[in-house]
Every structure is written in C-alpha cells, then in structure tokens.
Image (cartoon, rainbow, N blue to C red):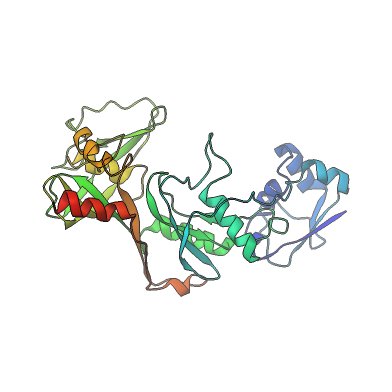
Amino acid sequence: MIKIVIGENEAGQRVDRFLRKYLGGAPLSMVYRILRKDLKVNGRRVHEDAQLAPGDEITLYLTEEQLGKIARSPKKKPAARRQFRIAYEDDQVLIVNKPKGLLVHGDAREKSNTLANQVCGYLQEKGEYDPARERTFAPAPVNRIDRNTSGLVIFGKTAEALRQLTKLIRERDRIRKFYLAIAAGTIDSELVLTGALSKDKETNRVRIVEAAEGHAAAAGQAEGQVDIKPGATTQPAETHVRPVRPGRRVSLIEAELITGRTHQIRVHLAGAGHPLAGDPKYGDPKVNEDCRRYGVSSQLLHAYRLEFGELDQPLDKLSGKTVEAKPPKVFEQIEKELING
C-alpha cells in the first residue's frame, strides 16, 4: 500500500491527470484500472474528474515492486552550466535573460542543455524545487523565443503561478512584450503589421497567407498567391513596430507582439520589406553580408522589455512592474557603425 500526500504544486488538478503523470510508465488502460479499483482519496473512492486539494492523501493499493515498474522515477536534472542571467525573481516567478543559441525546450538534437533544464537545476540548488517530492510538477516557461533570439523568458516557479501566467499570456492584455531588432532599410514611422500566418512543418518556414488591406501578403507576393497545403492551419497575427533609430541601410526598431506566433516578427517585417538583419531564413542577403563583419549569422532580435498590469495573487508582486534586459553588445556596435556611420 502506497500513500501520497498532495502538496501545493500538485493540487488543483484532476485525480486522473495526476495519476497519468505519476505513473508515467503505465499504459492508459492500467492507469484507469488502478483509478477504478486500487485508489482512494482520503479513504474514499472518487471519480476520475475529482479535483485534488493540498493535504489530500492518496492511497494506492499497490506493492512497492508494482509501483517501481510503472512510476515516473524522480530524476535530478543533469548539471548544466548556467548560461542565463536573472532579470527578476520572487517566490512565485523567475524571469531570465536567455542568451542567443540556447533552446528554451529540448528538441530531437538537444535534450539536456536547455534553458528549462538550467532553470530547474538552479531552483534545485536553491532548495525551491525537489523532483523527488513533486513528481508531477516542474517549473516551466510560459513564453517561448527562438534559439537564436535572445532575451526575457518568464518561468512559473509554482503550479498556481504557472496556471495564472499561462492564462495571462493567452489573454494578452496584462503582459505586454517588447523586442528590440535591427531591420533592413529605413523605418521612420510606426507600422501596424497584420495578416494570418501559416507554418510549413517540413521546412519550418512561416508565411503570411492572409493580409489586411494595404499590407503585402508575403515578401514579393501578392495577397491570394500563397499556396496553402491541405490541412494547414492559419493563425491571425499582429505586430506593432516603432522606430528607435532610423538609418539608411538598417534601422533600430522596437516591436510589440500583440499576438505571439512562431517567427511572427521575422515574417511580418520581411513581408513589409524590412527583414531582420542577419536572418538566414527570411533576410536580405546583402544586409546579412554587412552583418557578417560583426560575427552575426542569425536574426538581430532581442526580447528586451515586459510590462505587467495589475495582477492578482499569487502574481501581485509583479503588478505594475517593468522588467528589462539589455541587448547583446553587437546591437550597440551595429547601431554605431551601420546606422550612425
């Protein structure tokens, strides 16, 4: 017989979802059989949709040997050299400045040295996260930026903070996200870029497939001329671009994400005729060649500012705050020589 006491970070979820995570090595049929026959919460049988609360005691009528074969083993995250800098931290939230070249989550080629693993390792060292105790929860990011985009990423340190932050990111009105970028050409007035985006999973390229009146559908293409693969989905997108330092060849700009889609800033600016400097996928080869003199081989894009509105508990310490992170030094170098020069 196994007893599990539910903590704060494992509360608030359905018992079946908790069990599916806890018994990560068991097939679904076994999970639901255990739920029906071999599980009680506070001494009583419960339905699969019962909500768990802090302090609830789950009893599993399994032997240690049976559990060992199907339970998710509590593994300490592998030690990884910390590459991020802390921009803000309280007991619920951690906001970090991610360097260019580091994945937020793992992919097929890189699974261990990721920002998510580095943050979990940092919180383990602080004693704020123990995977042996919290088997169904791990601190996680609520926004995601590309490997070669640097800047601010928000992590929820507790389950409730993670739920609330995820909800706010979806609602878009109380967390504003701003980027600094260097784009091709002269941008000396505000641009409002719209148009639905579609991603080709095979090529990992995104295209504008439906543009608002007055905007190009894609670089070099008119609206209605972009082929959509069968089954592809489109998502509406909106980016506001403001000039910071206009130049002749390139301009330093601020871009605010009204929506948050894959490659959104990169694709919208390319569609407007101002691709990001250094961008190998959507960029201008001549501008990219200029940038190679500075060691730049990817888009010059940095998530530099977050503005928070009035937030409720447990996020109230962030209410009204602005969190910023300086861009990489190459921004300043290119600004001085390519924009001012």
Q: Position of residue 141 (x, y in %)?
A: 50, 54
Closer to the camera in the image, 252 or 132: 252
Q: Residue furthest front?
A: 293
Residue 318 visible at all: yes
Along the horizontal axis of the image, is 109 left or right of 177? right
Q: At 53% across and 55% down in the image, what residue appears?
A: 82
Closer to the camera in the image, 323 or 100: 100
166 is higher (above) or lower (below) than 215 = below
Dividing the picture into quarters, in which one does residue 2 lie?
Answer: bottom right
Q: At 41% across and 73% down in the image, what residue appears?
A: 319
Q: At 83% across and 49% down in the image, what residue appears?
A: 38
Q: Position of residue 232 (x, y in %)?
A: 38, 31
Along the horizontal axis of the image, is 84 left or right of 14? left
Along the horizontal axis of the image, is 234 left or right of 144? left
Q: Position of residue 35 (x, y in %)?
A: 76, 48
Residue 241 visible at all: no
Q: Position of residue 148 (x, y in %)?
A: 39, 44
